[in-house]
Image: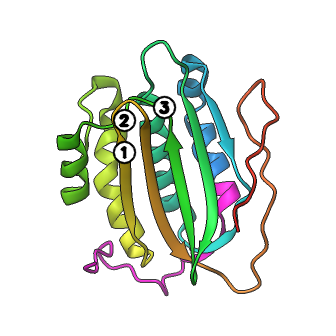
Amino acid sequence: MTDQSLPGQTLDDPDMTEVDVGKVVNEAIRNLQSLVARAAARITVSPMPRTWGCHSQLVDVFQTLIGNALLDARPGHPPHVNVLAFRDRERWAFLVRDHGRGLEPAELERICDFFLPYRTLACASDLDQGLARCKQVVARHHGRIRVESALGKGSSFYLTLARCHNERIQDLVPLHRGSNRRESFVS
């Protein structure tokens, strides 16, 4: 992957610190609360690790991925989004999975090739345009991002980020209403 760092920023910048990804995901979900409530969505989140990065940029990444997952719901079915974390060799891997419409093969190819916006819904334009920014931010964090999808079965976005020293898995209480379900951490 080519270096797609944001202009003038490197991993040793002051805004790159140890980040609690649980707090990042919680903030992203809070920012989407009106959409979550309007869609009667269910979001489950596994315990999240700490990583090295820029808190605000990682909030943007998760907000975009979760927001797109909420907007991709199948008609007549409330959205269900899973956010998971697991070890992937020497990195943390994160998965944002929806059970929505999924992507047409042409849409999937377009995203994989260019990671460009894939929906043209007027209410979602900011979220959709965020996919290109997600790739840029993840690259800045020396990670990778990819998508898998099956039409009618939903989409899964995977991203990797660096692990921290002395890391601990933090329990994260789901923010969605009406559920106390928590996904298990996958080791």
Q: Which callout, 3 or 2, points at the residue further toward the start of the chain?
A: 3
Query: What label sits on residue 70 in the rendered view?
Result: 3
Query: What label sits on residue 102 in the rendered view?
Result: 2
Residue 74: percent from left, percent from top: 43, 22
Q: Nearer the viewer, residue 125 or 81?
A: 81
**Number of other residues with Cα within 10 Å of mark 2, as a class: few under 14, some 14 to 19, many 20 or more:** many
Q: Amino acid at mark 3?
A: Leu
Please, is residue 23 above or below residue 125 in the view? below
Please, is residue 93 above or below residue 1 in the view? above
Q: Amino acid at mark 1?
A: Ser
Q: Secondary structure at mark 3?
A: helix
Q: Which residue is the site of mark 1?
A: 149
- What is the C-alpha distance between the residues marked 1 and 2? 6 Å
Question: At 79% across and 73% down in the image, what residue appears?
Answer: 168
The answer to whether the residue labelled 1 contacts the one labelled 2, judged by CB atoms less than 8 Å apart, is yes
Lateral position of residue 184 relative to residue 59, left or right: right
Q: Quadrant of the C terminus?
A: bottom right
- The boundaries of the magenta stretch are 1-24
Q: Which callout, 1 or 2, points at the residue further toward the start of the chain?
A: 2
Please, is residue 163 above or below residue 128 in the view? below
Q: Which callout, 1 or 3, points at the residue further toward the start of the chain?
A: 3
